[in-house]
Image: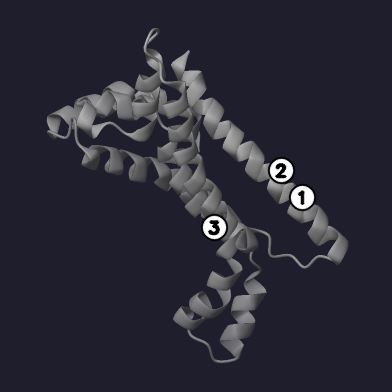
């Protein structure tokens, strides 16, 4: 928990030196390892908090009915854990899409650039900035995130609601989706300044 207080940016030099020692500079494998390893602590913390909230009475009653550990996990715990699994999937998917700093340190050659670095290079030139291409690229980042959210939104919001609440919830989902798209568009603009 204490390590979560230290920003990832402060470990940048150590990450670079480690990647250089392993010969992983300018490779996508280094980025995959960094992103996967960086997501594990936060996702574990989220999952633990959610799974601790599931009552133990469900396990005990299933065990009294003759279910084993594996069956309890698959048929009782996993269906109840679908919302947090969806949140972890969204966080793990959107984290690398918005990362600029680590990928710009690890990746050096233009053919290996990630999408945020490429978008930054489109608008970093003062005279030759291509804002229309930048907007199209920012939309390319926002579309998969929006699609993933649309696929997983019913998993996240599984509580029963009345018809009025469904309409309100649908409006909130549309507003949240709009805010997400604007956030990703503005995230690329922030790095170009």
Q: Is residue 87 above or below residue 51?
A: above
The numbered dot on residue 175 is: 2
The numbered dot on residue 88 is: none
3 or 1: mark nearer the eye: 1
Residue that mark 1 sits on: 171
Residue at screen point 81% across, 65% down: 161
Asked whether the residues under the numbered discs 3 and 1 touch, taking CB atoms below 8 Å apart as contact, a structural biologist would say no
Whole-percent x, y for residue 59 in the image: 59, 77
- The mark that comes first in sequence, 2 or 3, is 3
For residue 124, what is the image quadrant? top left
Residue that mark 3 sits on: 86
Assess disc 2: are there few (<14), some (14-19) or many (≥20) residues with their C-alpha within 10 Å of its C-alpha. few
- The number of numbered badges drawn on the structure is 3
| Res 51 seen here | no
Asked whether the residues under the numbered discs 1 and 2 touch, taking CB atoms below 8 Å apart as contact, a structural biologist would say yes
Whole-percent x, y for residue 95 in the image: 45, 40
Element at label 1:
helix
Element at label 2:
helix
2 or 3: mark nearer the eye: 2
Residue at screen point 35% across, 27% down: 117
> Would residue 123 be found to the left or right of residue 20 on screen?
right
Whole-percent x, y for residue 53 in the image: 64, 60
Q: Is residue 8 above or below residue 39?
A: above
Q: Is residue 135 above or below residue 63?
A: above
Residue at screen point 82% across, 53% down: 168
In space, the residues marked 1 and 2 are separated at their CA atoms by: 6 Å
For residue 130, what is the image quadrant? top left
> Would residue 108 be found to the left or right of residue 95 on screen?
left
Element at label 3:
helix
Q: Residue furthest top?
A: 127
Assess disc 3: are there few (<14), some (14-19) or many (≥20) residues with their C-alpha within 10 Å of its C-alpha. some
- The mark that comes first in sequence, 3 or 1, is 3
């Amino acid at each position: 928990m204490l390590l979560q207080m230290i920003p990832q940016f402060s470990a940048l030099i150590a990450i670079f030196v480690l990647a250089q020692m392993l010969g992983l500079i300018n490779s996508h494998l280094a980025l995959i390892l960094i992103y996967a390893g960086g997501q594990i602590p936060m996702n574990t913390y989220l999952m633990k908090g959610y799974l601790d909230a599931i009552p133990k009475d469900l396990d005990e009653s299933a065990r009294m009915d003759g279910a084993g550990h594996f069956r309890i996990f698959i048929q009782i715990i996993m269906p109840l854990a679908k919302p947090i699994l969806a949140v972890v999937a969204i966080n793990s998917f959107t984290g690398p899409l918005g990362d600029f700093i680590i990928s710009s340190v690890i990746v050096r050659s233009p053919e290996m650039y990630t999408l945020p670095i490429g978008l930054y290079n489109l608008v970093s030139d003062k005279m030759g900035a291509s804002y229309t291409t930048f907007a199209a690229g920012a939309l390319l980042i926002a579309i998969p995130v929006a699609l993933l959210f649309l696929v997983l939104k019913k998993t996240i919001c599984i509580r029963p609601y009345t018809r009025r609440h469904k309409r309100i919830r649908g409006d909130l989902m549309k507003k949240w989706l709009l805010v997400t798209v604007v956030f990703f568009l503005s995230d690329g603009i922030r790095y170009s300044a």
